[in-house]
Image: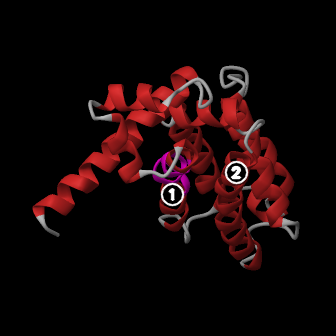
Amino acid sequence: MTRRAQQAEERREHLIDTALHLFAEKGWNATSIPDLAKAAGIAQGLMYHYFRNKEELLLAVIERHSFLAELKVLLSASSERPARQVLPEVAQNFALLLQQKRDLVQIFICEAQKNPEVARHQDALIEGGVEILTSYLAVRMATGELRPHEPALTARTLLYTIFMSQLIHVSGQLHIPDFVQFLLQGILSPEEQTH
């Protein structure tokens, strides 16, 4: 990559990070291109060199700050470990990840109701996590560790409950370890429940 291409990529990343903070702080509709250019320290016209419009920039923010890759890492590193160990860790780490991505969560809170494209991306992020967790649960079910059940429903219940608790700021009211233990009692095989 040439120096010029590297600088262009760095500037694009800077614009995405700047937009993340402004969109979370002011909302997507209330943030103007001049606001973005000023906060990023560039000329307004240069914004259009990187993004055709504000919606394209919003989608770049969502894509870049997605938590799906981190969720994949959490689950792939645990593929051989028992669910009684993995699910509490995944739940806690997912909640922590959402707290670290608070600006992105704030954008989802504000924009998903108004912008179908944002809502689609929000759903795709969670459903991507559901897919990964469903695969893990299906493997654990095949080994006999988990009783037969609908793993996609369990995955959705776990991830959406945590996601929604972060969206509406009830994380102090949702005691994640207790919630996961409650979930595990329903899916662990009888043999596993005695361990």
Mark 1, Cα crowd under 10 Å, few <14 / some 14-19 / many 20+, is some
Which residue is tagged 1?
74
Identified at 59% across, 38% down, the residue is 95
Q: Is residue 144 left or right of residue 103?
A: right
- Residue 175 in sight in this render: no
Mark 1 or mark 2, earlier in chain: 1
129 left or right of 35? right
Q: Residue furthest bottom?
A: 142
Q: Nearer the viewer, residue 176 or 65?
A: 65
Query: Can you say whether 141 is above or below 7 in the image?
Result: below
Residue 125 position by quadrant: bottom right
Q: Nearer the viewer, mark 1 or mark 2?
A: 2
Where does the image place residue 164, in percent across and percent down from the top left?
A: 74, 35
Name the dominant secondary structure of the magenta segment. Answer: helix
Q: In the figure, 57 relative to 109: above or below?
A: below
On the rendered image, what quadrant is the N terminus found in?
A: bottom left
Q: The residue under label 1 is which amino acid type?
A: Leu
Q: Residue at (49%, 59%) from the top-left corner? A: 69
Q: Residue furthest left?
A: 3
Answer few, some or many: residues within 10 Å of disc 2's Cα (few below 14, many 20 plus, some between 14 and 19).
some
Q: What are the residue bounds of the magenta stretch?
A: 59-68
Numbered circle sitting on residue 117: 2
- Measure how far apart labels 1 and 2 are at the Cα level: 27 Å
